[in-house]
Image (tube, coloured by chain):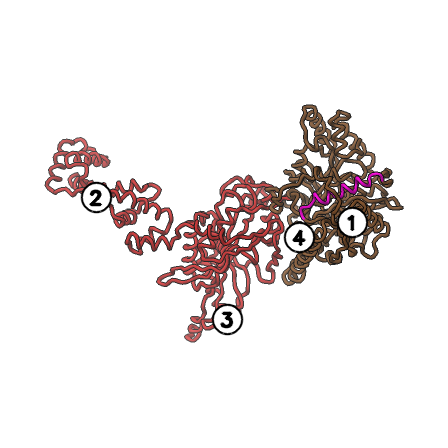
Chain colours: A brown, B red
Amino acid sequence: MNNLTIKQAKIGLKNKKFSSVELTTACLKQIKKVEGKLNSFVTVTEKEALMEATKADSAIKNGVELPLLGIPIAIKDNFSTIGIRTTASSKVLDNYIPPYDATVVRKLKAAGMVLVGKTNMDAWAHGSSTETSDYGSTKNPWNTNHLPGGSSGGSAAAVASDSVIAAIGSETAGSIRQPASWCGVVGLKPTYGRVSRYGVIAMGSSLDSPGPITKNVEDSALILEILAGSDSFDATTSPLPVGNYSKNLNQDVKKLRIGISDEYFISGIDKEVENSVREAIKKFEKMGAIIEKIKLFDPKYAIDVYTIIQRSEVSSNLARYDGIRFGFGRDKFMEEAKRRIMFGTHSLSSGYYDQYYNKAQKVRAVIIKDFEEAFKKVDIIIAPTSPSLALPVGATKDAVMFGEIADVLVEPSSIAGLSGVNIPVNISQSGLPIGMQIIGPQFKEDVILSAAHQYETNTVDELWRKKKPNL
Amino acid sequence: MEKEKTKSMNYKPVIGLEVHVELKTNSKMFCGCSADYFGKKPNTHTCPVCLGLPGALPVANKRAIEWCIMIGLALNCNIRLFSKFDRKNYFYPDLPKGYQISQYDQPFCEKGSIKVKSGDSTKTIGITRVHQEEDTGKLIHDTVDGKNVSLIDFNRSGVPLVEIVTEPDFESAQEVVDYLKKLQQIVRYLDVSNANMEKGDMRLEPNISLKLADQQGLPKYKVEVKNINSFKFVEKAINYELKRQQELLEKGETPKQETRGWNEKKQATQSQRSKEEANDYRYFPEPDLPPFRFTQDYIDKLKSTLPELPWQKYERFQREYNLSAYDVEILTREKKSADHFEEAIKVGKKYNIEPKEIVNTIINKKVDVEETPPALLIKNIIFSKQTTTIKMDDLENAISKILNENALAVLDYKNGKIQVVGFLIGQVKKILGKNADTSQIKENLEEKLK
């Protein structure tokens, strides 16, 4: 039963087919079975999870109805969880136990979730592979010689391996969509400011967006409904009303204008990835959507902008980890974090600020404008999520800019603060998942989720969907 | 020798000032913790935000920003319609985030000025900027179990601070002190800070340098004296620096550009940090706080809520009550005493008591506004006016009568129980009436009792 979606699990719980304790136990059993191969978790909270599940069962018995009541969920280890160690996969925080919950965690708890553990990630979310984790890399459930992507690689692998019903990740530029693509699951990066960052260990503060990683689009919509909304603890959250994402999943695709930009099918892109995404676009066309060629900036320009802004913010955000009030000292920082701190410190230094940070912000404004113009012509944009299939373990060795290059296709929309979702569209010959991203304007999660859901239901019988990781 | 002296006369002080004023808002600048930290148990007014815990985010205190803008308005500043917070990055153990949230290139208020009376002249001091920031925690160096330790109290961390920076317009320590007194008066009138020096509500940092009297522009160097918390010390520090720098200049040396501190024990400033070691604060816009876009309407509304400011009150008192500059200066020094005076006038009107009489009583009798509410003050004035002088004969007769009737009391007095005189006065008053002048009776009584 650990392979169920949220919706299916809820029906099972409601009809007393199984209890939350049984469901949670099934997940914990699966974790025990596959964790040795995958290493998706930094911390598994077995005891707490079973206690929460017991409570959920008595609540269900008493007729309580909550959107996630009794559902086992994993959360990326950069979300503060009261009383549960939160490391961001860095040994600097090996002994850090937060005294408070992130807003996302608080909302999930209020919705009745059973937290089964904290998932592995690139240390401080610095990377797209989980290979920078101080707790060892996570492996791709489809082929453990390959990487799951990152930084939310643990959450994506946990969902893909049915270790949990759903998981939470966070994306600065690609950290939800890219691992979702490599692991063959649905990963939603909401608009910047749609979901509160309060309690999420900051990476790039002007970019960080928490979001769900799920087995299907329906579950993604359900979790977004719980997470979205303004938060009095995060001044950058938007006051715009939260959509009814679940209800709006069936908006007609007919006449939906889909933009395709050749710039996103970059040279060197994996042929299977390109073909699968182009196939998927044709299917949209068959469903009645209008496909329009648009011209977006070459996404390579976003790499520099993203690198400068993110590292500048990182250099400031990591200053508090001095070992004085909590955690260990600075000697516990590893190579990648140190490189980013030095880069960011340099780009903010007097005499360099205008040349780097200031210029990056100007180009960022141009990229935002580019998307604004595009969205005058189309409703959504479709592109590959990653130019490659999941790369082999060890691929990041000596590749200093690995993450930035792996994430080239998701960086422009992240810089612009847009919404985007990865959905699986195929499995390669080699047995690795292929993902496609649907990008929407800011706060148009309802539109991209609906398009994604329509695609999913229209292709539900495709043979590749029957395949499962063999663990 | 004579020539040397003439040369030394030619230097002219160039002094600017940075003042940090702590606001008395209920909560801190970026979290809901109480900002009332003084004397509280260490680390009890803290939360994830002001402790800089992983993932915590700031949310700006609206009232603090309004007060910052009000200070700017009182100092005749331009209020920016677009403004933002920036991060000032530096490491210090009392700074939990590793950066201070401050304002860099777009402060809430800029380009103001204020008139300051110093001696017989009035001078206009340029206000460069007024910006909002947050306070740091406090380091306490102590001995615990025989070991020297540094402890940190984060109760003060995140308390709202307003920094007020002047142009280098001061030419003497006295001008600086006169400005500071005025600034203290303004923030108290605005009721935005207690401006209590002992509690560190106002921290002063003068920039001091000297230039030749005929030199154009600013000197090539400046010496900053950090974190002074008394007007007296700022005066001493400036005068010390002026002397020190003059001596160096006379030797043909240029004083080092550096930060110094005032050492009260040694009565001297001491070098803390030179320019070479100066921080590069790597300012950049605070991504956790969206920028501010104010409307002129909003600023105008804030302006309309400004209370009457000291100089406005000063002029009105002179005009309305026809009082001397001396009287008005004393009355308006503090808002509390000015308000007390005006309340007393209202009450006094019913009894035909002139403002001038009230002022005289307040000033001559050094009336405490806390202990003597306006109504009581007027009552006292009426009472003292009704006091009648007694004819000498009546007085002498009454005293002899009472002394004869109270031989025992007289004996007590002579044995040292001088407090019986009060009783005797009362007895005399029974004859002469209660409005009889007490001091006159007392004087005569004591004469008789000798």
The 10 Å Cα crowd at callout 3, few under 14, some 14 to 19, many 20 or more, is few
Across and down, in percent, residue B380 comes to 26, 41
The 10 Å Cα crowd at callout 2, few under 14, some 14 to 19, many 20 or more, is few
Residue type at mark 4: give it: Glu
Residue type at mark 1: give it: Thr
Furthest residue to the right?
A429
Relative to A272, A364 lies left or right: left
Residue B385 disc label: 2
Q: Is residue B367 above or below residue B421?
A: below
From the image, state whether disc 2 or disc 4 is nearer to you.
4
Q: How many dots with numbers?
A: 4
Q: Is residue A100 above or below residue A380?
A: above
Residue type at mark 2: give it: Lys
Where is residue A446, by image quadrant?
top right
The dominant secondary structure in magenta is helix
The stretch in magenta equals A442-461
Which residue is under mark 1? A385
| Badges 3 and 2, same chain | yes
| Badges 4 and 1, same chain | yes
User: Secondary structure under badge 2?
Assistant: helix
